[in-house]
Image (tube, rainbow, N blue to C red):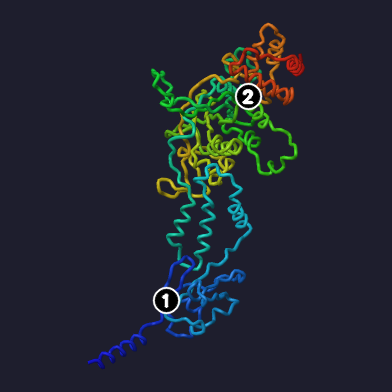
Amino acid sequence: MICYAILLASYTTLVTSITSPTILRIRTVDGSVLRVPLPNDDPTSTLSSILTSVGVVANDNDNDTTPLKCQVGLPGRSDCTTLDISKSGTDGQKTAEELGLKHGSMITILPPPIDKSPQDVSTSNTNNNNDDRFDPFPDIAKSTSYSSASKRARALARGSRSMNYGDISKVRSTMHTVEPQSKGSLLRVYVCSVAAARFQNHCIVNTPTSKKKSSSKRKKEQQSQVENRIALLFGTINKERVNQGPKKARTSLSSSVEDKMCEVGKVHAIWEPPSQKGNDKLYDEDCLLSGYITSDTDDDDSSKKKKETPTERAIRVANYLGLQPIGWIFSYTDEDRHTDDALPVHGRDAIIGAKLQIETMKRLGRETGSKFVTLALDGRVGACEAFQLSDVCVQMVAEDVLPSPSTLDGETSTRYMELKDPVVISGEETKKLDSVLLLVNMAMLSHVGLYSGGANAPAAGNVKRGSGALLIKTRKRLLAAINDDGDSSKIFKELCDFDILLALDGMIGSTESEKLCMLVRKYARGQKKGTVLDNHLKLVLSSALGG
């Protein structure tokens, strides 16, 4: 019986050794392992024939400078060897017997280096220099773009059938998830009604009429043309109670901590860049972006003195007055802005606003600069709405995911945009984005700004709309107030206008301008007693105004 069992075991082993083929394991570049039999179970089969039997071509490129390589044996062990299986190499003709391949041996296909064209090199350099890129919101920033990640994943999967789920997940992680944002950094904004009305007044341009008609008839038939404009908002960030209702009755045991506080923005001045070239369809954003956004080369050449731009001069005067950029305003004349419950801020406007907010965050810091407001004003009737841009919108603009504004100029409506890279919306990947998802609603209240000229200021302003220079009647009014020794507050009432102070800055110099702005700042904030112009400033102002 024992002999029979031994004979049966020997026979089974012999049959198994004869009938079972030699199985080799091949690990592809995507990490998957293929189990394939040795061709014809012949130990003289070459390595190239083994790889070809499973659809892995040794080298399907004519470029031998990037050969495909493989490893025989388990990686990390001393018996693991690296072989060159390119067309010019001889390792592909080695047999299984020479390589020591046996049942269960592992062949690992190594990923080839990626061929870099000049365009690819520039793309990779951009991705490698992400440390130089300013990320407004680092928590949601992506280390690489979707295009670069997808291209690299496809290159690494070369030689295999497809990408695995891990590769797909890594590529998907480079996409931004766009969803509605309920709250912004500011709860509400106080917009100066005088400055906003003046901005809307500047949008209206009277068209010339024919000379053949009488003057009375010409006045009746004269029509106004509306041109779109753009401006920068200067103001302050303040804290106040969330509920602005009547104050609650307090006792000695009450605490001020009971009131919930919030941050609000207060617009005290609206500055319009000079020489705007807007029309009835688009505003001229270049006049503001070119002077407001500073490039890295400008920082490197800071030792060289450059001519101060009008935008930089406006920011300097605003700093004298204790103001900072807290937003921007633009006008529109499109009749279909509100169709299908749309909001007046479209994709092109969101991109420009995001660029301005990014620069503000560079200037003031991420926390302070994120308190940035976008105002959209109907140039025909003066209706205004306030919004903030979502965090993901600003970050996507910083990563160049959204299209450039110049590519959207020819389109009739930019509510829906075609993105450069796909994003995830409601769990789906798409390149078409509704700009409504990029906006955050906020409350808007009215007040009179400290540097708007007051409620009795001229509706058209005190400076020329195109150049920002003082009007002749404004010069005469300022000279009369300076020469009035009886009422010293009259001159300060006139000077509480940002446009006037900015025009005077270019006429009297920065040193005297700073002294003048500090006095006006004290007067505007209630320190009226003891705030007077000295004889030196009076003489400088009189000389500049032609007195």
Tally of numbered discs:
2
Residue 36 — which label?
1
Viewer-proximal residue, 221 or 170? 170
Residue at figure coordinates x 68%, y 14% from the top left = 532
Per the rendering, the mark at residue 15 is: none
Which percent across, then down, holds residue 323?
60, 27
In terms of secondary structure, where does tag 1 sit?
Answer: strand
Q: Quadrant of the C terminus?
A: top right
Name the outermost residue toward the bottom: 3
Q: Quadrant of the N terminus?
A: bottom left
Residues marked 1 and 2 touching at CB (< 8 Å): no
Residue 332: x percent and y percent?
A: 54, 30
Q: Looking at the picture, tell me which residue is in the foreground, 408 or 231.
A: 231
Residue 463, can we see it? Answer: no
Mark 1 neighbour class, 10 Å CA radius: few under 14, some 14 to 19, many 20 or more? some
Mark 1 or mark 2: whose residue is earlier in sequence: 1
Asked whether the viewer can see residue 81, the reply is yes
Between circles 1 and 2, the one closer to the viewer is 2
Residue designated by label 2: 321
Can you say whether 142 is above or below 369 in the image?
Answer: below
Percent coordinates x, y for residue 196 in the rendering: 55, 23
Residue at 42%, 33% (x, y): give it: 341
Among the 4 quarters of the image, the one containing residue 86: bottom right
- Name the kind of residue labelled 1 in the image: Val
Q: Which amino acid, mark 2?
A: Leu
The residue positioned farthest toward the front in the image shown: 252
Q: Nearer the viewer, residue 311 or 296?
A: 296
Rendered position, 304 above or below 526: below
